[in-house]
Amino acid sequence: MHILITGAAGMIGRKLVTRLVNDGALNGQPIGKLTLIDVVSPQKPEHFSGQIEAAAADIAEPAAVSAAVAGRPDVIFHLAGVVSGEAELDFDKGMRVNLDGSRALFEAVRAVGGGYRPRLVFTSSIAVFGAPFPAAIADDFHLTPLTSYGTQKAATELLLADYTRRGFLDGVGIRLPSIVVRPGRPNKAASGFFSSIVREPLNGEEAVLPVADSVVHWHASPRAAVGFLIHAAGLEAAKLGPRVNLTMPGVCCTVAEQIAALRRIAGDKVAARIRRAPDPLVARIVAGWPSRFDPARALELGFRAEASFDDIIRVHVEDELGGRIAA
Amino acid sequence: MHILITGAAGMIGRKLVTRLVNDGALNGQPIGKLTLIDVVSPQKPEHFSGQIEAAAADIAEPAAVSAAVAGRPDVIFHLAGVVSGEAELDFDKGMRVNLDGSRALFEAVRAVGGGYRPRLVFTSSIAVFGAPFPAAIADDFHLTPLTSYGTQKAATELLLADYTRRGFLDGVGIRLPSIVVRPGRPNKAASGFFSSIVREPLNGEEAVLPVADSVVHWHASPRAAVGFLIHAAGLEAAKLGPRVNLTMPGVCCTVAEQIAALRRIAGDKVAARIRRAPDPLVARIVAGWPSRFDPARALELGFRAEASFDDIIRVHVEDELGGRIAA
């Protein structure tokens, strides 16, 4: 089993690599080779007995993606992309990386020929949806993104489905919820506070909450995201059918419920480190995001997220804090 | 008022030009200039007092589209495209013309700069939808095309909405029903019989019906299609909002109802010229097409199709047969 990961240096990419190395196998087959690419050269994992290639590559350069698929990887995890904020600030870069880069990858796979038809798992996003929304977004709700990032993801989903239908590759698109709790330092993303209000208090630091406690959102942990990717790699194409893009399950909860979960798990002192500082701009951005889904197809196909926000916090404590909560 | 039409040599393009020349005005402003482009040089209309440019141009060539928009047309009707069957047979050509060509046009408009933000009316298609369908397809049903043509139209819709949101242009996408009765000779399109079973009998010729009388479909006349385009050109952006792509109204009826309408209008002798010759391939293709919509938004915004298939036949008799039925 040879696996290619684009965007392998990103947060999800690194966690996926770690999981694959620990598992030693994918879809029941031992992993003999990993090819890792990203805009910066990804770190090679330790303790991997198989062959490994890691290289800096521009996904939108046809030569670079051709080289990456020349070894005919059996499974491709396509995580590479410019994030939402950057795609909004730099339209051309977002189009080039997120749309043209994905298409270049699909074309490179198609060009290999000789019956080559790898499973290609593409990470899409709930940013493909745009307000106004129904109470819960069903699997057949239309994609009307309100960001260039969401537009690029939605267009790539369409290409993925058509390349799959034509037999050029064997695609599965998974629309990730907001991934919390992101490890690392606070960032400027409008969604950053969803992680911050858990991560910083657990770290003994203050976190700023820019929106009302009543804000509802759709979450899954980094561990769940990696689980989605692994599960997507093994999905039977016949069960999936032609609608290859799926909204992933998640935990729907209010900010108040997030905070209550933190209090249950880490105590009042930790939860008290959240400071309310309403920011109308952030509040307006967040109001345009989808918050509740009915991901019936993904559930039927066996995708599983956490059952509660308590579980999401526990995953963070286990995976990032060595299981210890310092009160 | 300067108007650019891409695909001006096609059936709808020619009818649009005729209508615009007859009206002499669009959105209440006199038409001073028409720029007509297509893969073959479009015919210049007679009796037009304004300035006219007609040229062969490859829509996917950035230089060609830049030249077409250099004169800063106030309204652009973007009809150019490779048809469904051809896009399915030649994937690369369909991608190049339908997707890259549309994007090249949008980019050319964006590149003009200096506050230039023309109304751009894009003809999409109900091929953006793919089975299985609900009883009636609502405006918020997802796009899961089952053809490369539908994929390219759907991806272009996404780009149109984002280019509009960012202020690069002022787009409206209209998803046309099946256009019947198409003038001219029978063609090889799987949908051709919907027109043939009216056109040929009215012309004293036999028509072949390859599907069951119970087949349901969604129709509008060429005249209605031109009406949609004109109406879209004048739509207020504020009323339209960010969801700029609209399913057009149409007439939903069975083949049996089509034939009954033909009998009412032209008599038994004409209707008897339809010969049933079931074709399982055509039947299977047609079964994958959407057949009934609930185009609430388009109706609310004032788009109007015919009220019945009788009206669609009457439009054909008036516009193509000089109002005369030869029994």
Image (cartoon, coloured by chain):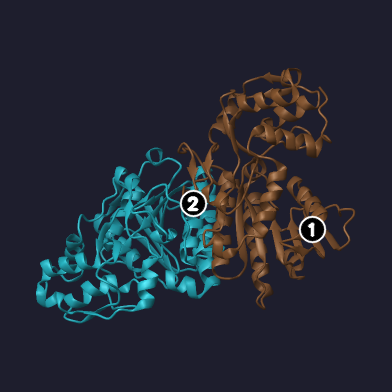
Chain colours: A brown, B cyan
Q: Quadrant of residue B179?
A: bottom left
- Amino acid type, callout 1: Leu
Left/right placement of residue A278 relative to residue A141 reads right
What count of labels does the image hold? 2
- B133 up-or-down from B284: above or below: above
- The quarter in which the C terminus of chain B is drawn is bottom left
Badge 1: chain ID: A
Using the rendered image of the protein, determine whether residue A269 is visible from the camera's viewpoint. Answer: yes
- Alpha carbons under labels 1 and 2: distance apart: 34 Å
Using residue B106 as the reference point, say whether residue B42 is left or right of it.
left
Graded by Cα atoms within 10 Å as few (under 14), some (14 to 19) or many (20 or more), the crowding at tag 2 reads: many
Q: Position of residue B260 (x, y in %)?
A: 16, 67
Query: Does residue B31 appear in the picture of this structure?
Result: no
In the image, residue B47 lies at what x, y percent? 25, 64
Does dot 1 land on a helix, a strand or a loop?
strand
At horizontal 76% and vertical 45% (from top left) the residue drawn is A11
Q: Chain of mark 2?
A: B
Q: Position of residue B23 (x, y in %)?
A: 25, 55
Amino acid type at mark 2? Leu
According to the image, label 1 marks what residue? A36
Q: Is residue A291 above or below residue B323?
A: above
Contact between marks 1 and 2 (CB within 8 A): the answer is: no
| Position of residue B28 in the picture relative to residue B90 (left or right) | left
Q: Residues within 10 Å of mark 1 (few under 14, many from 20)?
A: many
The residue positioned 20% from the left and 58% from the top of the image is B308
Q: Residue at x 62, y 53 (%)?
A: A95
Question: Which residue in the structure is indicated by mark 2?
Answer: B160
Q: Closer to the camera: disc 1 or disc 2?
A: 1
Q: Are marks 1 and 2 on the same chain?
A: no
Q: Secondary structure at mark 2?
A: helix
* Picture quadrant where residue A107 is located: bottom right
Between B309 and A73, the residue placed more toward the observer is A73
